Image: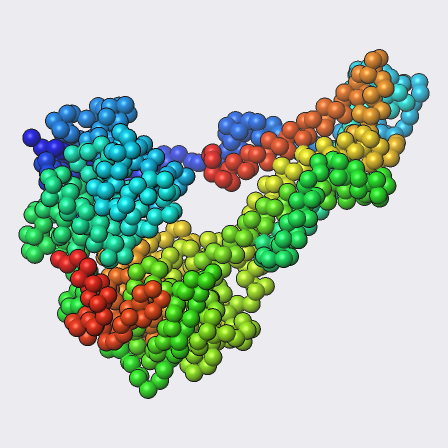
Amino acid sequence: MTLQNAFDIPRGPGPLRRALRLARREWGAALACLFLLAVALGAAWPQLLTGYDPVAADPLAAQLAPGAAHWFGTDHLGRDIFARVVHGARYSLLIGASATVLAMVFGTLLGLIAGLARGLLDEAISRFLDVVSAFPDLLLALVLIGFTGPGTVNLIFALGVASIPRFARVVRSQTFVIAQSGYVEQARTFGLPRWKLVTRHVLPHAIAHVPIMATIGLGTTIIGSAGLSFLGMGPQPPAPEWGAMLSEGRNYLRNAWWIGAWPGIAITLTVIATGVIGRRWQAAFEGRRG
Amino acid sequence: MSLIDIKGLHIAFPGVGEVVHGIDLTIAPGESVALVGESGSGKSVTARSLLGLGGIVRAERFTIDGEDVRTHAERDWRRIRGRRIGYVLQDALTSLDPLRRIGQQVADAGAPDRAGALRILSSVGIPAPETRLPQYPHQLSGGLRQRALIGTAIAREPALVIADEPTTALDVTVQKQILDLLEARKAAGNALLLISHDLAVVARLASRVLVMRNGRVVEEGPTSEVLRHPRHPYTRQLLDAIPTAASRGKRLAPRGADPLPPKHIDASRTVLEVQDLHKRFSGTPAVNGVSFRLAAGEALGIVGESGSGKTTVARMVMGLTEPDSGRILLDGQQFSRIPEVQRRPLRAGVQLIAQDPLGSFDPRYTVERIVGESLDTLGVFGAERRARVREVLEAVHLPERFLQSRPRDLSGGQRQRVAIARAFAPRPRLIVADEPVSALDVSIQAQVLDLLAELQAEFGTALLFISHDLGVVHHLTDRMIVMRGGEVVEEGDVTRVFTAPKAPYTRELIAAIPTL
């Protein structure tokens, strides 16, 4: 190779170009990512996106249609809907994510215990999970809130408990298989104590699917939180929760559609975006594409 | 006219490149030809090209029954598959659909009616075929399954049957039945293309042999000529790699003058003592009164067919299965029927080499961590562990660059070497090896056996070697036990057992070994 040729070696594309190329191939997932980033930004620093106070009422500006001053219009109390939707992201994401983490942690623990214990304990846990998942998630959460009363923390608890079986079942069946694998048996022959076998060789493999399931499940808990807030079980007024806003807007659909429409769109897009990302991740993980 | 006439065959795969580089292959009607070589030599790919399966095929001439197949589309190949060429895959368990009855599968393969299916099944030597038609593959034994699979391949009476490693996973007596069956077909004038790395099987069946390596035919000729007077060094190497009586105490790869290091057997020190072991699985006895002892540095072989209880014995010795009754003493200390907490400190003294090394490695672990983990209970950590891991990897001839490799990136031979390194790392007094070479090609098997023998001699480790391959046991071990139905039918010095077997079953086993 001559010196001349050495300079002709094409340089690999830079990171930005690579990202753009990936985004063009995976435009759906890229759009979903962008949207979720915007939602996350709204949850973290809503002031960056809007100057309005989400709870400040202005009776003189009630029920204004979307326009230059109020992009999404105003509601029956004259509050800026764009500001409320942006500030509301915090509730939806916080409740959705907290409930999912709760379900993830306890689901994984229960699944692991059931998968390792076998026998009576497994039977007990599995039947408990059967009972829990026999009720629709939302109904179960509603029942739990019936006991605990409405409020953000109770909502998180109710939604989290309702989602436990999903995680527990997958982790349990994975644990089952892995606990019987050759490498766990081999590690046993080294004289390793049980807790080392579990933490080193069982747990890391058993939870491989959990982050993906959590992403897909996030959409479900967000819908659940909006649904229960719609029924008045979540954050209480005047908190700008999307479900609660939808509920308020319901009464004005005839003459001010924008009051209910914008939070509804926000819920829908957020749930679709988490679903798209979760499914795409799952597909990549299972090697079906790319 | 030749049944198969191929000249200058090239096969490539997208992303992999060319794997077969211009080979010639002709098969006359009624002729039986063998393709021999190790995995990756291109022998299976070549055979599959005769059915239009896989790869980008290029050839100067490629005719089947005089028909040029080079431009055949998928639908043209369908006229050939099963009708003119039948294909028997290696693994009958995965090649038969587990959810379809045997009768349905024979019908799928082209049996015209029930009578036809019965005729096919009895022609492949399945006794009482009418009882088999409604059964599922899992209800059949390994030998019957393999026969049913051959039945599906010959259902349309093809002029040529391709048998891809038809006996590799089978016990010697079952293997003999399958070989008898294929031989009978050959005698009846059917052409056979046999693919195998087992030269003894080839010697029995094929009249002509092609030795393949890296996608090329390195030697071709009449079987007896090639096996008796190999011209190519690779053919010689393959022949030398076969463990036999004659190779005892010598290296297999490369074979010849090099003797193995002398063993240090200390008959006065008993490492393992097994007393009257019994084990039942859901009422059925798996092991029924097995006793033996193993001296320091000695190698004891346990042979038997699947279901003989040999693996259960190995698992009990490893403390993975608890015996129902009887005792296992490791270095004079009770090792069986004690709480796991008491057993753990003793476990470093006995190490396992499993049949499937890949399955015995945590896929997330690097080679360094895999080998090092066996040192955990000895409290060997840090620099000392790193040094020990490097030392055993060197002993199994794996360079340091493999330290950070993951199991999936290793070849079959490298994996088994890592498993051996791991077993020797804690300096155990006893190693239990359960079929450690049965999944390996003969040349890789030779290297692994050499390594085992070498390290065993060097460290004075006792070896309990479980195998269904009598040749391997004959080559490697000092004493042997023959098991059948959970009982020991014969025990003794290896040479004595092979030259003067006492039990009729041992005689049967030895007679079933295909020889060159």
Q: Residue at x 13, y 33 (%)?
A: B4
Classify the position of the N terminus of chain B by image quarter: top left
Vertical side of A28 occupied by B170: above or below:
below
Closer to the camera in the image, B223 or B255: B223
Q: How many marks?
A: 0
Vertical side of B4 occupied by B333: above or below:
below
Percent across and percent down for residue A269 are 68, 27
Left or right: residue A181 compared with residue A122: left
Percent across and percent down for residue A3 are 32, 39
Left or right: residue A281 compared with residue B319: right
Closer to the camera in the image, B260 or A82: B260
Vertical side of B312 occupied by A105: above or below:
above
Farthest-out residue, right: A59
Is residue B422 visible from the viewing direction of this image? Answer: no
Classify the position of the C terminus of chain B by image quarter: bottom left
Vertical side of B342 occupied by A124: above or below:
above
Percent across and percent down for residue A172 are 59, 50
The image quadrant that residue A153 belongs to is top right
The image quadrant that residue B199 belongs to is bottom left
Q: Residue at x 17, y 62 (%)?
A: B511
Q: Residue at x 79, y 37 (%)?
A: A142
Left or right: residue B237 compared with residue B401: left
